[in-house]
Image (cartoon, grey):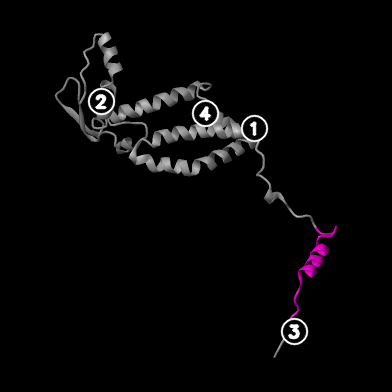
Amino acid sequence: MSADVEYTTFSDAGDAAEELLSDSAPKPDTSMLEEGKKRSKRAERYEDKVKEFVQAGFAITVRKPETRADAAALVMYGPALCEKWGDLADADPRVRKGIDYLTEGTQNPYLAVAATTIPFIIQLLRNHEQDLEVKQRGLRIPFTQKRFGFKFGLKMKFLSAVPGTSKPEFLEQHVFNDPDVIEKLEKLGIKAQRVS
């Protein structure tokens, strides 16, 4: 059995296309062919502020093997994260205020104090981690020979994973083997011995 097949020539197809593209047909949407939406200067400015914050986090996390995966995540997702937070800040004044609060430490003295004090306290706790372990402790009751015993201490195994802190031995070596520190200590009359 043979079937009659009708073939359309290129000129016939062009005539059909002309009919479709007449004045009554909708215009094609060319937005896909254009560059992306222009962003406001404010969105770009807040993107930069968030980027500074993310870069600070990267600088802290890339230094330690335990947090290097976090640094890699910041490299992978950071650019889009910064862009979208910038867009959100452009649209919402509360987000702008929050970003300003976090990134402009000099204008917010409370945040500046917290940002410098918290790492110091965490490093001190890490330096004395063994002293603070949970163990039997006791107090002597005044004017008697009796002792009151109790278990007390803090479990702080997480301190070694806190970015920005160092092992106490490494911190000692880093600070007290620095030639500038040794020189200034000697000027103050303090005999500095190198730490090995």
Query: Which quarter of the image is occupied by the C terminus?
Result: top left
Q: Circle 4 sits in a helix, a strand or a loop, which is it?
A: helix
Res 8 quadrant in image: bottom right
**In this rendering, position of residue 154 left or right of residue 59:** left
For disc 3, the marked residue is 4
- In the rendered image, residue 109 lying in the magenta stretch gets the answer no
Q: Nearer the viewer, mark 4 or mark 1?
A: 1
Q: Nearer the viewer, mark 3 or mark 2?
A: 3
Q: Circle 1 sits in a helix, a strand or a loop, which is it?
A: helix
What is the crowding at mark 1: few (fewer than 14 residues within 10 Å), some, or many (at least 20)?
A: few
For disc 1, the marked residue is 41
Answer with mark 4 or mark 1, whichever residue precedes in sequence: 1
Direction left: furthest residue: 145
In space, the residues marked 3 and 4 are separated at their CA atoms by: 75 Å
Q: Nearer the viewer, residue 34 or 147?
A: 34
In space, the residues marked 2 and 1 are separated at their CA atoms by: 47 Å
In space, the residues marked 2 and 4 are separated at their CA atoms by: 32 Å
Answer with mark 3 or mark 4, whichever residue precedes in sequence: 3
User: Residue 103 has which mark?
Assistant: 4
What is the crowding at mark 2: few (fewer than 14 residues within 10 Å), some, or many (at least 20)?
A: few
Q: Position of residue 149 (x, y in %)?
A: 20, 32
